[in-house]
Image (cartoon, helix red, strand yellow):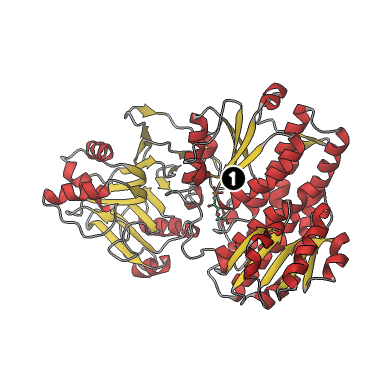
Amino acid sequence: MCGIVGFIGNEEASPILLDGLSRLEYRGYDSAGLAVYGQEQGVQVVKAKGRLKGLSDLTQGGATVHGSLGVGHTRWATHGAPSDINSHPQVSESGRFAVVHNGIIENYVEIREFLQSKGVTFVSQTDTEVVAQLLEYYYRGGLLDAVNKTLNRIRGAYALGIICADHPDMLIAVRQDSPLIIGRGECFHMLASDVTAVIKYTREVSYLDDGEIAILTRDGVEVRDRYRQVVEKAVSHVDWEVSAAEKGGYEHFMAKEIMEQPEAFRKTVFPRIKDGHVLLDELEFTPEYLKDMDKLYIIACGSSYHVGMVAKYNLEKLLRKPVEVTLASEFRYCDPIVSERTLALVISQSGETIDTLAAMREAKRLGARVLAIVNVVGSTIAREADDVLYTWAGPEIAVATTKAYSTQLALTYLIGLHFAEVMGAISPESYARIVSELLLLPTKMESILEQRDSIQYFASLYFNHPSIFFIGRNVDYAVGLEGSLKLKEISYIHSEAYAAGELKHGTISLIEPGTLVVALGSYAPLFEKTMSNVVEVKSRGADVLGLTTGTLYDAMVKTVDHAMAVPETHPMLLPSLDVLPLQLFAYYVALQRGCDIDKPRNLAKSVTVE
Ligand code: AGP
């Protein structure tokens, strides 16, 4: 997904833009560029297909492009192949306007045809170029007037950064369905796709809402809403360290974030447990509301959806209420059954995933109350939900989520315990047992991570397998979904996760000598049944890598080719332990295959376009 940075101040803009873009690289991109206004040279544009290092080399680290007003961009191609000319910034015919954009201008074809009929010459295949050309078309000397007229004409999702050669004291930010933040400095201001790009320069940030325009000058920021009325924006202080968004000596962000999980779990859970009790002060759910709830609808995408799959097993067991888990992209178009008695649990690391955001808005429109689990503070989903619980995982840079997944899982445990207690649906003994096991989880997670060498060994055996299956039952199946996605995402190996009992309904036809099956057998009540499925695939020639708990290890290792064991814990909490070997397995397989682990091909950290 594209990354945007803008700067207006009294220092050279280029080095700051390049540094900001480097902190957005994790979002995934295929080209990069910047535009800087300088008194002598006017608007200078330097852009190229390829990595950010290429842009830095072209500008000698920004030294050859002078000026204190500028915008920068890393492009994840949607309209128009990755190329120099399709890179951003896109400029108007005269070169007066330079625009960077994240999102999609849905009606760009009609606008392009209109402007071409007026004699405008287009040079790129991008949708974004119509914004630069429209600005020019409407421009009669007033920058804001041209911006307003342009925004009235375009449709779609867009975060825009705009500079104009005639207005060197203004940097324009516009937000519609694509995230954009404002960084506030002493005598400078910045705009960016997310906080990581500005935190080195300022911790004071504001989050633009849909329809808002921000006019940034060296002395201040004015924000206007969709009706062009001036609005006061809250200023938030970002309290995590810059180092949190750096590798800290690890080869990859993903490795660092895998290892950070015990600490992220502690930060997310421990402040919310006092004297053996779960305290979710952020929430106000009454016994009446929860008892009257007709359904808990979990809505998410990708790994966040997999958290929901685990939560379904746990929450139905705890609450004895129907829990439905759905992909956000499906929920929006399936005419869902939602009422005022429905609680929608929306899960999102970024808080900006467009499918999840749109599904949440649809659930609200249908009358549901929305509780969100989000990692990025101040993100759109967090701000639009009725209630929000933050995972305190810190910034997650690797495209493949790990610590956010684990802390989302943790919050579903806390929500289940809290709701069950409020409803009087759990005995004090069961409650206490789960809480005490929760508090032991981070230490148990650490013991697993210490065994990562053995997991690296397994990866060395199997990294060339063309197809890898994950099978399990109940929560083992749910965490197998995540293990399979991790492997696919970063190693590009085809993989599927199946409910072990489902194999015989078709998929077992794919099992042949040499197929690798990862069998998850930690959930003790169904261990025997899973092991019978293991025998089925073994008898057809599969290699089987087993994952179970210490007490079941001896039983498993007799049947499988290799086995890993995780410490015992409450059945509900098993996924928090089982997911770690699966994350490490995926990581080490991808490492053996020389893949771009932090920035896998075709993927973006947050998918803000449909
Ligand atoms: C997970 O490793 C992937 N990066 C992806 O599936 C991700 O979980 C999904 O896009 C949802 O993102 P979100 O949690 O930010 O909404």
Residues packed near mark 1 inside 10 Å, few (<14), some (14 to 19) or many (20 plus): many
> Which residue carries the number 1 mark?
375
Q: Residue furthest front?
A: 505
- Residue type for callout 1: Asn
Comparing 12 with 249, the one in front is 249
Residue 225 is drawn in which quadrant? top left
Q: How many marks?
A: 1
Judge left or right: residue 56 versus residue 285.
Answer: left
Tell me the residue at 43%/44% (across/down).
Answer: 180
Q: Position of residue 349 (x, y in %)?
A: 57, 47
Question: Looking at this view, is 484 or 46 the one in front?
Answer: 484
Residue 84 vs 308, above or below: the answer is: below
Question: In the displayed structure, would residue 212 be above or below residue 467?
Answer: above
Q: Is residue 584 left or right of residue 430?
A: left
Q: Is mark 1 within 8 Å of ligand 1?
A: yes
Give coordinates of residue 274: x percent, y percent: 79, 35
Q: Can residue 286 be seen here?
A: yes
Does residue 248 appear in this view? no
Report x, y in % for residue 58. Answer: 34, 69
Above or below residue 261? Residue 438 is above
118 left or right of 5 in image? left
Q: Position of residue 256 (x, y in %)?
A: 64, 61
Apparent side of residue 593 relative to residue 429 in the rendered image (left or right): left
> In which quadrant will I find the N terminus?
bottom left
| Above or below for 420 versus 605 | above
Query: Residue at point 79% right, 63% down?
Result: 532
Say what secondary structure mark 1 lies in: loop
Outermost residue, top side: 288
- Residue at x-position 68% and y-position 73%: 459
Q: Where is residue 33, by image quadrant?
A: bottom left
Residue at 65%, 31% in the rendered image: 282
